[in-house]
Image (tube, rainbow, N blue to C red):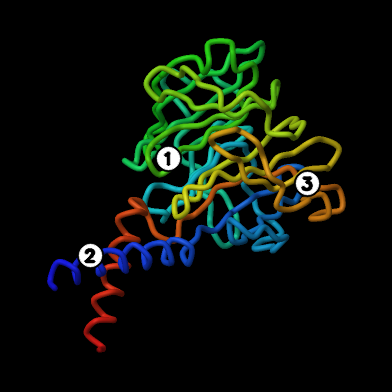
Amino acid sequence: MKTRSLVLGAAAALALGAAASSAFAGTTYAIDQRNVPHSMFVFPAAAPAPTVQSANASFAGFAMDFNASATTLFGISNPGNSIGTIDQTTGNFVPGPVINGAGATETNWSGMSCAPDGSFYASASGGAGINRLYTLNTTTGATALVGNIGAGTAALNIDIAIDRNGQMYGHDIASDKVYQIDKTNGNVTFLGTGTTGFNANFAQGMDFDWDTNVLYAALYTGGGTGVYASINVTTGAGTSLANTQPWAAAGVEMEMAIKAAIPEPATASVAALAGAAFLSRRRRR
């Protein structure tokens, strides 16, 4: 009887874990870079909506992400190349040190992402198929070159995002394809054989919701048009969740980051919540 009870308990815990995973989801912070003043939209990651948190955000840039504990939102300013923090209520940017080290001469920081271990990475697009990946120290602004992203096969990498398992992904707007990136050397592996299905142009936003491990993207398609979409990390195909053109009179071109409801490691947190709920349920009996 004890064995059966333990098996049933494990099954119940797994079911509760699945329920907890769906109940807890991240929040998207998206800052429009097309219009001045910049608006900051805040909404559930899986339910995009033009909910204006601030109509006068001062952050201007194309690289931003939360730290692993989901407490601080960082960004790289453009112009200025300063690594600083972004106020989650006002969208105002507090500049810190200027980017230095190997990436000191970069002028187009296209993406930034934090790994589960707290390490930050940043991507820069230099044109002519030259896209570089760096490690980034958010305290000092120091950068170290990891390598070229895709060594020419990723013609215009425009953003990066890291999932809750530590795997990095990138988005090439020349081919409209998404790929995995090796964080140790910048080599890429394309997802599937197709494209996202969207003709993305100019700046883009992309990030994972670590609570669900779903990849989302703010895909700008030019002329004020765009969508907020989820990206299938097996096929690379995108699914539109919202048309973002009506979010502003001239449309929006958004950089974005997702704040996890349960800081990493999300899986362990969900399991703990499931176990606690199961024990609590048994005690009430």
What residue would you read off at disc 2? 7
- Contact between marks 2 and 1 (CB within 8 A): the answer is no
Q: Is residue 266 above or below residue 216?
A: below
Q: Is residue 82 visible?
A: no
Which of 178/130 is in front?
Answer: 178
Q: Amino acid at mark 2?
A: Val
Which of 14/24 is in front?
Answer: 14
Mark 1, secondary structure of its residue: strand
Could you say where residue 56 lies in the image, as x and y percent from the top left?
70, 57
What residue would you read off at disc 3? 35
C-alpha separation, residue under disc 2 versus residue under disc 1: 37 Å
Q: Earlier in the sequence, mark 2 or mark 3?
A: 2
- Contact between marks 3 and 1 (CB within 8 A): the answer is no
Mark 2, secondary structure of its residue: helix
What residue would you read off at disc 1? 114
The residue sitting at 58% across, 10% down in the picture is 152
Could you say where residue 177 lies in the image, as x and y percent from the top left?
64, 26
Q: Is residue 69 visible?
A: yes
The residue sitting at 60% across, 18% down in the picture is 154
